[in-house]
């Protein structure tokens, strides 16, 4: 049961663009076919055809680190480093735009976590520190455009419910609250922090799945974001988030994906049995495509069946409205995500990690590369 006080009303939906959240596609595995967790990018497109591996060459090498420690917005990569610095890097050139640092406490030997607020105006970074004779979470808020410090605080936990460990993931943030998701050795936990004073408003010992502007969803329940009041109880524990859209979230539950109303927990629809790929599904702006015995497309808003291709695929990613299906090491097909129509067959595919209207982040043996691809 959550503990703590009351937060203020939410004014922005929490749709984050962070390392493994809201924008991530697969990354390459040793076999040459990509694999990763996270929800895929959702963008619009004006390009005439899907880019292939041969179209995405050159580019700017980037050192971003692991998922949860970087974010991309407005032509910049925002990266938290082990030394406690946060750097904004211009994607087109690799130039450092600004750099800022934590200043409070003695840091643990752990890389800070980082995410963007829902409106992308604020960088939210967290690290674990020793200060005032105890272990704390250090919170740093920066203006995303300039790098100026908006606030820096040691997060207060008056109920002493939060188990301080490695920095938690920033699941969502807006002008009023920040949602934290942690999975320490001592147990999974979720908390909401008030931006105004850096105090934990409430906490529960359950793993976070997703957050909207007014609801936090954990594996076992839905909670009012500002107060921690329980809105609904899950009948079966929820799995990883697959997609988040207005008024609906899609999560994996056992061997299927289910569409849920985040405010009530009501199930709207579900997929056929999913395969073992990670992730098993990828979302565009209006469709969710899932791997199983074959490949199936669903309407993102309501889970309505759209199409099915019988041939299975090993991995999946999306760029705009195109779905990339790996069927052999580094090769596969590109389909229209809404109709299932094959646009390109048996081609060398790029190792997509993230894409937006200006370019594509791809992965390789030496790390990440940003390749401009205006659309």
Image (tube, rainbow, N blue to C red):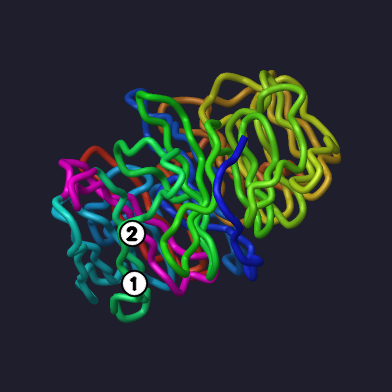
Residue shown at 52% from the left, 34% from the top: 332
Residue 311 placement, left or right of 146: right
Can I make out residue 321 in this image?
A: no
User: Is residue 211 on the magenta stretch?
Assistant: no
Residue 373: name its quadrant: bottom left
Tell me the tag on residue 52: none
Q: Residues within 10 Å of mark 2 (few under 14, many from 20)?
A: many
Regarding mark 2 in the picture, which secondary structure is present there? strand
* Residue 127 drawn in magenta: yes
Q: Which residues are magenta?
A: 107-134
* CB-based contact (under 8 Å), mark 1 and mark 2: yes
The reply, left or right, for residue 60 in relation to residue 267 is left
**Res 139 quadrant in image:** bottom left
Locate residue 342 relative to residue 142 in the image: left or right.
Answer: right
Q: Position of residue 155 (x, y in %)?
A: 36, 55
Q: Nearer the viewer, residue 137 or 159?
A: 159
Dot 1 or dot 2, earlier in sequence: 2
Residue that numbered label 2 is attached to: 139
Q: Is residue 124 above or below residue 167?
A: below
Q: Please provide percent x and percent y for residue 356.
A: 50, 62
Point 40% across, 62% down: residue: 72
For the point 44% across and 57% down, which residue is it? 199
User: Which type of secondary structure does the marked residue at label 1 adopt?
Assistant: strand
- Which residue is found at the position 42% from the left and 30% from the top? 33
Disc 1 target residue? 151
Percent position of residue 243, x then y = 64, 44
């Amino acid at each position: 049961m959550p503990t703590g006080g009351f937060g203020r009303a939410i004014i922005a939906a929490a749709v984050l663009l962070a390392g493994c959240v809201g924008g991530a596609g697969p990354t390459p595995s040793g076999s040459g076919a990509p694999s990763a967790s996270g929800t895929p990018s959702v963008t619009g497109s004006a390009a005439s055809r899907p880019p292939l591996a041969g179209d995405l060459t050159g580019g700017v090498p980037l050192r971003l680190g692991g998922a949860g420690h970087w974010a991309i917005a407005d032509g910049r990569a925002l990266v938290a480093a082990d030394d406690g610095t946060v750097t904004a890097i211009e994607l087109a050139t690799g130039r450092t735009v600004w750099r800022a640092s934590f200043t409070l406490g003695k840091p643990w030997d752990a890389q800070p976590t980082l995410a963007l607020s829902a409106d992308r105006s604020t960088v939210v970074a967290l690290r674990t520190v020793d200060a005032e004779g105890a272990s704390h979470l250090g919170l740093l808020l920066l203006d995303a455009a300039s790098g100026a410090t908006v606030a820096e605080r040691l997060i207060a936990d008056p109920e002493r419910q939060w188990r301080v460990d490695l920095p938690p993931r920033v699941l969502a943030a807006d002008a009023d609250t920040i949602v934290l998701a942690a999975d320490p050795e001592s147990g999974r936990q979720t908390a909401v922090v008030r931006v105004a004073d850096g105090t934990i408003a409430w906490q529960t010992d359950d793993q976070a799945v997703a957050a909207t502007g007014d609801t936090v969803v954990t594996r076992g329940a839905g909670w009012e974001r500002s107060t921690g009041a329980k809105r609904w109880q899950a009948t079966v524990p929820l799995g990883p988030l697959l997609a988040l859209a207005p008024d609906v979230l899609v999560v994996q539950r056992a061997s299927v994906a289910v569409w849920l109303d985040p405010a009530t927990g009501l199930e709207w629809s579900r997929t056929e049995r999913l395969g073992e790929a990670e992730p098993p599904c990828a979302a565009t702006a209006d469709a969710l495509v899932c791997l199983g015995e074959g490949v199936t497309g669903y309407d993102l808003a309501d889970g309505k069946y759209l199409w099915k291709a019988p041939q299975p695929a090993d991995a999946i990613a999306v760029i705009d409205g195109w779905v990339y299906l790996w069927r052999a090491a580094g090769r596969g097909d590109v389909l229209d995500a809404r109709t299932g129509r094959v646009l390109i067959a048996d081609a060398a595919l790029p190792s997509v990690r993230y894409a937006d209207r200006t370019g594509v982040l791809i992965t390789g043996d030496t790390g990440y590369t940003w390749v401009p691809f205006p659309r």
